[in-house]
Image: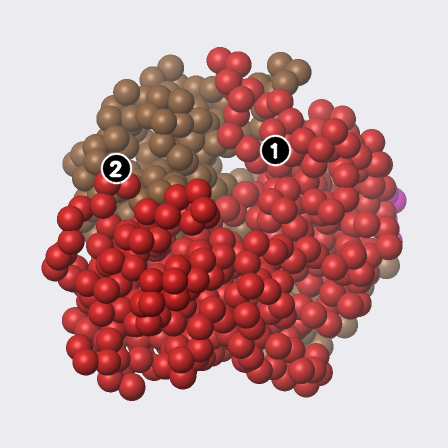
Chain colours: A brown, B red
Amino acid sequence: MSHGNLLYAQSGGVTAVINATASAVIHTARSHRIKVLAARNGILGALREDLIDTSHETAAAIRALAHTPGGAFGSCRYKLKAPEVDRAPYERLIAVFRAHDIRWFLYNGGNDSADTALKLSAIATEFGYPLSCIGVPKTVDNDLVVTDCCPGFASAAKYTAVSVREAALDVAAMADTSTKVFIYEAMGRHAGWLAAAAGMAGHGPDEAPHLILFPERAFDEADFLARVQATVARVGWCLVVASEGVRGPDGRFLAEAGTVDAFGHAQLGGVAPHLAQVVKDQLGFKVHWTVPDYLQRSARHLASATDLKHALAVGRAAVQYALAGRNAVMPVIRRIRDVPYHWKIVPAPLADLANHEKKLPEDFIRDDGHGISAVARRYFAPLLRGQAPPPYRRDGIPAYVTLKNRPLAKTLPAWPG
Amino acid sequence: MSHGNLLYAQSGGVTAVINATASAVIHTARSHRIKVLAARNGILGALREDLIDTSHETAAAIRALAHTPGGAFGSCRYKLKAPEVDRAPYERLIAVFRAHDIRWFLYNGGNDSADTALKLSAIATEFGYPLSCIGVPKTVDNDLVVTDCCPGFASAAKYTAVSVREAALDVAAMADTSTKVFIYEAMGRHAGWLAAAAGMAGHGPDEAPHLILFPERAFDEADFLARVQATVARVGWCLVVASEGVRGPDGRFLAEAGTVDAFGHAQLGGVAPHLAQVVKDQLGFKVHWTVPDYLQRSARHLASATDLKHALAVGRAAVQYALAGRNAVMPVIRRIRDVPYHWKIVPAPLADLANHEKKLPEDFIRDDGHGISAVARRYFAPLLRGQAPPPYRRDGIPAYVTLKNRPLAKTLPAWPG
């Protein structure tokens, strides 16, 4: 333990490739003879001194991590308060890091995690504790600024576009006597990145998706119904992609538009069932709908090869930055060229990323507000490109790995949080 | 046109591999120099004399059909009345067949289609019109008797098991601070075949799915909530697979259990959101849910290689039976052995299949009623085995084919139906 240990933690919603980043982190650290500890359930594991010693995992298990979705060490939705408000957690983290000789902290997450890593880095400096804090990008929401895209997004985007294409072929075959309208609900509460990716499923106004409802555009029910009706009249059927973040003119989420159960309780969301009801009631068409929910972000079986390369590259770079003594930075993806696609990993200061949110660019949305532009297609195409299927077992299920996750002995008093 | 033409039609809900059957039919017929016509939108196309001449499709397009989901010629949900009730449609069909020299009719569908093909065959005999009527099996519901399984089912089953496995890895990572219960809704209004297939995602009581709700077992809300609570206490989270066909003790579908929108209208189904609401209200856990709907039956990207082989084999055999002069039969799949998996195609009289429905065997359900048995695993494992991915374009989307579907000139008066 002379040169110290590296701590890796996963944060926020997991993705199809966040474990690929973990795999690259551990592999790269091992090649430098650095021990990797992992915090169980993100920063909470660090606070609780609930640490995993990854040395017990075989090289084969670490390789298999690269094709296993979910978060192998557990993630968390937990935001530390600013140190001005509550210094105790930061001091606790330094105490835990000191107790386990942690000199490098890699936090794999989104905006909040970048912010936490940045603040922790400042506190460590204040305490005179030698620590490199490196943010590692991850989010299906694709909402980190500075980076061209976020590992995890491209696979969810590929899932979305492929699923919409497949559902479209189904509905087209059924429309004569059965389902005429199909509604697909895409994740994205604040920005329409995944809804936009659905646009890759088809070209031109007669190919599905015929209508994309973006959170960037206020929903107008009359206009929506008119467009659905016109599409059914012209094409014979209509496929709608709705972002879960679509809001009405009053600014309220459509998913919370007053649907109640039999007892009058507000019902758990779902833009798709809501819109399906509206179409059925107002236009009388037979409607089917889907809410893929977590399936879209965990579909490792359909991961984008580009996404996997990005996820591995940011993991490798994060360790290299850490060992080179960099601090408060994140390896981000810079696009050099669309065609042929070229990209590289560069370091970006966490201060440039923390607490910012990248919106879907206005010029990604087609002029009519219900489809994507050529600019968007140029952005998405290389991200969705290439397949990276996992190996499968003989019973037809992917050979995903479950790690041993052996805990390290605790040495400190319990954390009350 | 000396030896006559073959008419192929698709019926009912389409699948990931019904077009593979179509591809095999056309390829095999072409090798015998037989022209294949296709009815647009199933039997309705035959009634309307809306026929497609598949001779215009290139060999490459017919090969690509084998990896394209949906129904390439359109399908229909339309059941002919019995000839005793209404003979006119049957007489019309014979007139259309006569006008286009159709000597072989291949109807690709489920129970109803087998029944239609059988009745049509009887009428043709009565009219002295030489016609071979061959049923070709297809249904994600897996509810045809006689055959060991139905092409289309195994791919939907693989989709179900893989999706549940992936969602489970996601939920396991989030459970500490976020989602503790996840509910997956599987198709199957009358039998729990797809819900049962989800059981392949894990082994033992602590692996997901922790609870399967079969339509074969009456739903007991108190028992369900107790099991969810016990699973969360023991494992930390709980993944539930619910068949859309689950019914309460009163025999009503749970999906219709009184959910209304803000205007008091009955809301479009969804067992999963209903159960999610119950869990949230009664147990207070954070819940996520998914309704994959058509995605599960159109996911050609995740097709089972076994299923694809079956789908191609029944298509080839159907043409061979037709050309050999067989009538009122269906090529079905007979399982010879589980391990190593051996199967063959044999002809079965349509009379043995028509209007029967195969239920999920009782011994597929685990004694506690909420999981699958070893018998079920032996049945499912070879069906889910093997991958058969489609080719992909450079923008990351599968290269699915759209046929020209050139109509044949009509020669008869219009059909009023």
Residue B1 drawn at (x, y percent)? 17, 77
Q: Three-letter amino acid code at disc 1?
A: Ala
Q: Secondary structure at mark 2?
A: helix
Q: Is residue A211 visible?
A: yes
Which residue shows up at 36% across the image and 27% down it?
A284
**Subunit ID for the residue under disc 2:** A
Which residue shows up at 29% across the image and 26% down it?
A225
Q: Secondary structure at mark 1?
A: helix
* Residue closest to the eye, A51 or A216: A216
On screen, residue A11 above or below B360: above
Q: Quadrant of the N terminus of chain A?
A: bottom right
Residue B407 drawn at (x, y percent)? 16, 59
> Is the same chain shared between marks 1 and 2?
no
* Residue closest to the eye, B46 or A93: B46
Residue A308 drawn at (x, y percent)? 46, 66
Count every numbered label the image shows and give the total. 2
Circle on res. B255: 1
The residue stretch that appears in magenta: A411-415
Circle on res. A232: 2
